Image (cartoon, rainbow, N blue to C red):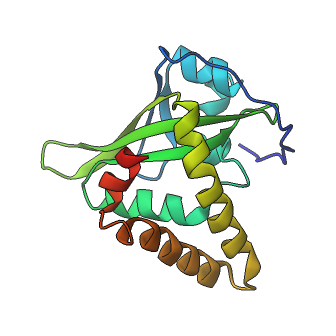
Amino acid sequence: MMRRTITPTGEESPFGAEELLVTKTDVKGRITYANDAFLRVSGFTAREVIGAPHSIIRHPRMPRCVFKLLWDTILGGDEIFAYVLNMAKNGDHYWVFAHVTPTFGEKKQIIGFHSNRRKPEPNRVSHIEPLYDRLYAEEKRLNSNNEGMLRAAAILAGAYHERGLEYDEFVFSL
């Protein structure tokens, strides 16, 4: 599948607090399943997303360091909760509170990932959005993508360590 450039609209892609957006991926992050709620909110069809990288819904202002933390965690066999800013096919955005878990095979090896996402409460987004803006700005400030991501990751870690929390505790404290 060829990736098109989509321009963010600044409009929110609505979905209800009772809805659950679900996807499953293989170990490389290619979508193997997407529920109807995910398809509706993202604006993609099943045909467009099955086999596509999950990054098809990545909003360009979403800090890369958050995805690095997510991937490091799930590849290590652990679950993670994270606030994520996604982008629909038409450029509209939507915030989610994601719970991502590895799926294990018979021999306890990771064979894929499962993500359940809910609409976060607006007050939670108002707490995380300024931090994500700061992380994104740090990533873009440096000429090196990798160095920018590492510096932003240090800022993220500082945000929860200065409160005496680990990442999971920080996410649930917002």
Q: 160 or 138, which is in the foreground?
A: 160
Relative horizontal placement of residue 41, taking residue 150 as reference (left or right): right
Q: Residue at x 58, y 32 (%)?
A: 122
Q: 102 or 91, which is in the foreground?
A: 91
Residue 114's place in the image compared with 82, above or below, is above
Residue 98's place in the image compared with 20, above or below, is below
Q: How many marks?
A: 0
Whole-percent x and y of residue 92? 78, 33
Relative horizontal placement of residue 9, taking residue 26 as reference (left or right): right
Q: Residue at x 14, y 50 (%)?
A: 108
Q: Residue at x 37, y 42 (%)?
A: 100
> Which of the 4 quarters of the picture holds residue 26?
top left
Whole-percent x and y of residue 48? 68, 29
Relative horizontal placement of residue 66, taking residue 74 as reference (left or right): right
Whole-percent x and y of residue 2? 76, 46
Residue 114 visible, this angle: yes
Residue 54 visible, this angle: no
> Which of the 4 quarters of the picture holds residue 95?
top right
Residue 47's place in the image compared with 108, above or below, is above
Residue 61's place in the image compared with 46, above or below, is below
> Which quadrant does the N terminus fall into?
top right
Pick out the residue farthest to the left.
107
Whole-percent x and y of residue 34? 51, 25
Relative horizontal placement of residue 78, taking residue 173 as reference (left or right): left
